């Protein structure tokens, strides 16, 4: 079996403005990584299809969807200070939100080992009531919600440099979704404290690992092994969804972490081992340096195939290790 690569050229039609970081060229860089893959004859291309609008109401309030549609009806416009729509944005957003649902269907039918949803706009900042942070609809949450409806237990791992506040909000009280975020702190959107652990039945099913600017890959791996994995093992997920933001790369222009594409390879390999082959999905989130985005996507595609390819050496020796020891103690006090 191969790797499913789900995309649609209409995702290029989301045009937030010439000076906006979330440019169509980002998707070009991801598509270039497909050409770099050493096993591209084993990559199965699938044309993304738009999500049905009724499905959006599983995670988003009707008022939010109606607001986006009204902006679309006017040919585009500003959603918030950072988030804009053009005439093609609404369809692109629905394609991005539908890609994961297609992936589920193909994987459940045994048609692939894993899936990479190469779509835009990204989604992890979109909350139940608000589009924000370059995100219109929460792509990963829509897919996770559907899996939960099928009786699955879903692990969502978000290693975008920015905290996935929208995904956290959507599942904050859901015991069937374990949300794990490793992110730069402090940084937009200002959420993601280690003390945010979920509420009600979902208390303990949110795990935030805030990391200092300059943190390198060795600290990420230690955080995964010593903090995240004990919680994941107790949760026993049946599917893993990865919000793959590559803005933690040291070249990224809007963040300050110290990762390389090699680090994304090793971290992704660890993450996907939490569930069997055929139950693994990756969603493109952030990442705004085009070279870093291409190299990191290449590394992740190979990781999905079970191969370790390091386009760049892994990073180590940065700050942050001392904070992991403190977090281990705090997490043990709030065990799932």
Image (cartoon, helix red, strand yellow):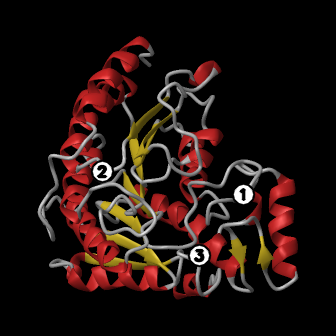
Where residue 4 sits, quadrant-wise, is bottom left
* Of the image marks 1 and 3, the number of the one nearer the N terminus: 3
Q: On residue 8, which mark appears? A: none
Tell me the residue that label 1 is attached to.
56
Disc 3 to disc 2, how far (Cα)? Answer: 39 Å
Please tell me whether mark 1 sits on a helix, a strand or a loop: helix
Tell me the residue that label 3 is attached to.
49
Disc 1 to disc 3, how far (Cα)? Answer: 14 Å
- Note whether 210 is above or below 272 in the view shown: above
* Of the image marks 3 and 2, the number of the one nearer the N terminus: 3
Q: Residue at x 66, y 61 (%)?
A: 137
Q: Position of residue 140 (x, y in %)?
A: 53, 54
From this viewpoint, is residue 31 visible?
yes
Nearer the observer, 245 or 57:
245
Please tell me whether mark 3 sits on a helix, a strand or a loop: loop
Of the two numbered discs 3 and 2 in the rendering, the one whose residue sits closer to the viewer: 2
Packing grade of label 1 (10 A; few <14, some 14-19, many >=20) is: many
From this viewpoint, is residue 145 visible?
no
- Note whether 310 is above or below 291 in the view shown: above
- Note whether 261 is above or below 324 in the view shown: below
Disc 2 to disc 1, how far (Cα)? Answer: 37 Å
Q: On residue 214, which mark appears? A: 2
- Note whether 10 is above or below 230 in the view shown: below
Q: Position of residue 147 (x, y in %)?
A: 53, 46
Q: Position of residue 129 (x, y in %)?
A: 77, 50
Packing grade of label 3 (10 A; few <14, some 14-19, many >=20) is: many
């Amino acid at each position: 079996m191969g790797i499913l690569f789900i995309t649609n050229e209409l995702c290029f039609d989301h045009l937030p403005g010439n000076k906006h970081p979330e440019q169509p060229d980002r998707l070009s860089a991801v598509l270039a990584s497909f050409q770099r893959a050493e096993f591209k004859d084993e990559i199965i291309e699938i044309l993304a299809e738009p999500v049905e609008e009724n499905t959006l109401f599983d995670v988003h309030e009707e008022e939010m969807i109606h607001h986006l549609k009204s902006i679309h009806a006017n040919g585009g416009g500003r959603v918030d200070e950072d988030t804009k729509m053009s005439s093609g944005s609404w369809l692109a957003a629905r394609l991005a939100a539908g890609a994961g649902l297609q992936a589920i269907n193909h994987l459940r039918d045994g048609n692939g080992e894993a899936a990479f949803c190469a779509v835009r706009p990204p989604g992890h900042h979109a909350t139940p009531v608000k589009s924000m942070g370059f995100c219109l609809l929460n792509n990963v949450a829509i897919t996770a919600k559907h899996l939960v409806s099928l009786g699955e237990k879903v692990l969502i791992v978000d290693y975008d440099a920015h905290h996935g506040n929208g995904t956290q909000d959507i599942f904050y009280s859901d015991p069937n979704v374990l949300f794990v975020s490793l992110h730069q702190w402090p940084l937009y959107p200002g959420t993601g404290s280690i003390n945010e652990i979920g509420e009600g039945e979902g208390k303990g099913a949110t795990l935030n690992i805030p990391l200092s600017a300059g943190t390198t890959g060795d600290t990420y791996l230690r955080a995964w092994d010593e903090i995240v994995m004990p919680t994941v093992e107790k949760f026993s997920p049946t599917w893993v969804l990865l919000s793959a933001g590559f803005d933690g790369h040291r070249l990224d222009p809007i963040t300050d972490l110290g990762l390389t594409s090699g680090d994304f390879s090793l971290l992704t390999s660890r993450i996907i081992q939490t569930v069997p082959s055929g139950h693994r999905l990756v969603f493109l989130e952030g990442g705004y340096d085009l070279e870093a985005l291409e190299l990191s996507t290449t590394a992740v595609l190979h990781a999905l195939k079970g191969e370790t390819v390091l386009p760049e050496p892994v990073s180590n020796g940065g700050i942050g290790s001392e904070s992991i020891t403190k977090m281990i103690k705090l997490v043990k006090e709030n065990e799932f």
